[in-house]
Image (spheres, rainbow, N blue to C red):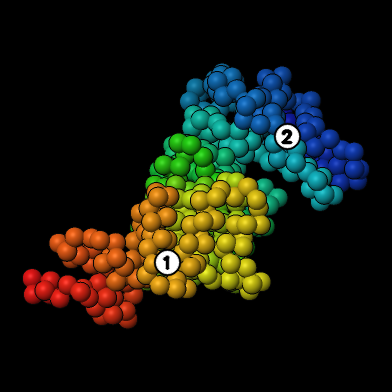
Amino acid sequence: MLSLPTDQVTSLIHYTMAAAALSSQASSTSNADPAVMVSSRAAPAWTHALRELLNVPNRAQYDNALVRRHLSAHRRESCPSAPSRDLELFASAKFPFAFFNAAATTDEDARPDLVHPLFAALVLGATRDVVLRLYEACPAALGETTRDGLTPLHLACQHSASVRVVEFLLRHCPSLAHRKSKSGWSTPLHAACSAGAAPEVVRALAVASHSALGVRDRRGNLPLHCAALRRSTGSSCDAAAEVIRLLVALKRNALEIENGMGMRPLHCAALSNSLCLASMRVLADMNPLGPNEAASSVDRSGNSALHFASSHGSTARADVVRALLEYAPCRAAGVNKYGHSPADVARFDASTPREVVTSIVSMARLDSLADDGEAAKLHASLLAGGWAKGADLVLVSRPGLVHRLGLEEVLVPEVALKMERRIPAENNLSALFALIKGVPHLVAR
């Protein structure tokens, strides 16, 4: 606890009383300006300047170098490595910083959310040295939260803090890794995965609290669900894929866990429509029960991952839709509890790419092909459309078709091996018989 001279205690009282007065005023009038600053006549002019630097509404307007300069210039004369008393007073006070109040919409939200300067610095992307100086000036700020129960670590993870900042917060207050927010019940690991944090940040959080990998937020999401739902673009897709692989490696059974809507991580990824195909394959291939089960599973409304992947209109991705069909072609004909198939979902939006619709329709026809002639036409059309693996699925449905296609006898064993993993176990014998029918001498080879 700080031991402060009488005049400094008076200054701190001015800070606190002014903040309380502002909060009371804002709650009694709907026209209160959420970004108005707490007045402090006892505070020196430089603290007003520092406060204004932290009162910007977004990261683009934040000047970290200038903040660093202000903080470095005011050290205690008797101990140059320690912050000045004025800085301690400033860091200990709470203010209605613009970032935390700009989005207020309801009467409850209209009350200014008073937070320490450390909180404002973290959401604006302050570097480790700035965070260090504010922490030194008021270590107790690490134990505080916003009105929604967000800790400094939550804020750092939500706003793309560097791994150095995250590790600094974890080192000085390890318990932050386990804390859950009031409104969303989310841990800092949830926040990091939802915000698309760097893989090294996610790794640091998982090491600090391995149990957080199995914690559900208010919607029933694990951190893996949050990472799968995250919308990423461009170069961030590679980082997102690394985060997915990391989370799966640390808690593989999370792939089978459903959130509050009955959705597994693969469903979430198909819904977000932003993960690279490699990430989608990790979520399917690493499932303990196998990729077919992962792609066949449905949520509480009967939607499979294929339903979600087909629902994005012009941005629906043929590579994802085809990958899901390769894992579980039977889902092409599956309907949800509203009676809609993936093809129906795709057709709801006329801008859905044609290859997405035709891929789904082609697989839905597999079980209703009249004869090998019709199967051969479908096989040829899929090859012409550039989907060789889709053509393989036709052979899985009708193994005897290889003879109609005129394949050389020497290629039949190779085709059999290629198809082996795609033929359901209960159909292995009949498929093998159909494949070698007419070339029995191959069995003796």
Q: Residue at x 45, y 71 (%)?
A: 369
**Residue of label 2:** 98
Mark before the other along the chain sequence, 1 or 2? 2
Q: Position of residue 207 (x, y in %)?
A: 39, 53
- Mark 2 residue crowding within 10 angstroms, few (<14) / some (14–19) / many (20+): many
- Mark 1 residue crowding within 10 angstroms, few (<14) / some (14–19) / many (20+): few
Q: What residue type is disc 1 on?
A: Glu
- The quadrant of the picture occupied by the C terminus is bottom left
Q: Which mark is residue 383?
A: none
Tag count: 2
Q: Give the structural element (helix, strand or loop) at label 1.
A: helix
Camera sees residue 204: no
Q: Residue at x 44, y 47 (%)?
A: 276
- The image shows residue 9, relative to residue 150, as above or below, that is above
Q: Position of residue 431 (x, y in %)?
A: 28, 75
Q: CA distance from mark 1 to mark 2?
A: 66 Å
**Residue of label 1:** 374
Q: What residue type is disc 2 on?
A: Ala
- The quadrant of the picture occupied by the N terminus is top right
Relative to 32, 293 lies left or right: left
Q: Position of residue 337 (x, y in %)?
A: 63, 74
- The image shows residue 433, relative to residue 17, as above or below, that is below
Q: Nearer the viewer, residue 40 or 126?
A: 126
Q: Residue at x 32, y 79 (%)?
A: 427
Relative to 100, 406 lies left or right: left
Q: Position of residue 56 (x, y in %)?
A: 69, 28
Residue 87: quadrant of the picture? top right
Relative to 154, 417 lies left or right: left
Camera sees residue 104: yes
Q: Residue at x 22, y 75 (%)?
A: 437
